[in-house]
Image: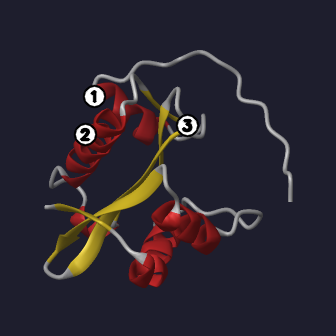
Amino acid sequence: MIETLTTNDARVATLLWEECDLTRPWNDSRADFLKAVTGPCSAVLGIREDGHLAGTAMVGYDGHRGWVYYLAVKPAFRGRGLGRQLMAGAETWLRQKGAPKVQFMVRSENAEVVEFYTHLGYVPAYVQVLGRRLD
């Protein structure tokens, strides 16, 4: 069952993200988590197996697009459909917020993840993402 995580889940969620190689040294994943779970337009969804956090999906709605970040399933729990359940939960959360579409970013070298999303019916958007740090 999908649940909305709280600040109490910060440590276990960020450890999961590290285990799944989703973190980068220049991003503070704990701060990302805390901003999402306390923000008015975002949340971190989780799924537990055997009492352990097995997967997460951070969701946010910017008023135009829904976004998904940090979709992660603990390696020991992969192959059970948890990633599919988390994306369905993310889509439901975004629909309830009024988001007409959902987007996310995948590192271009991560072919396995691209294949996962393609299997779920997502298609490439063929846009270039530009960015700059503000902190």
Q: Which mark is residue 119?
A: 1
Quote the CA–CA distance across marks 3 and 2.
16 Å
Give the residue at mark 3: 62
Front residue (pair 15, 109): 15
Quote the CA–CA distance across marks 1 and 2.
18 Å
Residue 64 position, x and y percent, is: 53, 26
Q: Of the two numbered discs 1 and 2 on the same chain, state the one appearing first in sequence.
A: 2
Identify residue type, mark 1.
His
Given contact means CB atoms under 8 Å apart, are the residues at marks 3 and 2 in contact? no
Q: Secondary structure at mark 1?
A: helix
Front residue (pair 30, 119): 30
Residue 62 position, x and y percent, is: 55, 37
Q: Which mark is residue 92?
A: 2
Front residue (pair 11, 63): 63
Q: Secondary structure at mark 2?
A: helix
Q: Residue at x 49, y 55 (%)?
A: 40
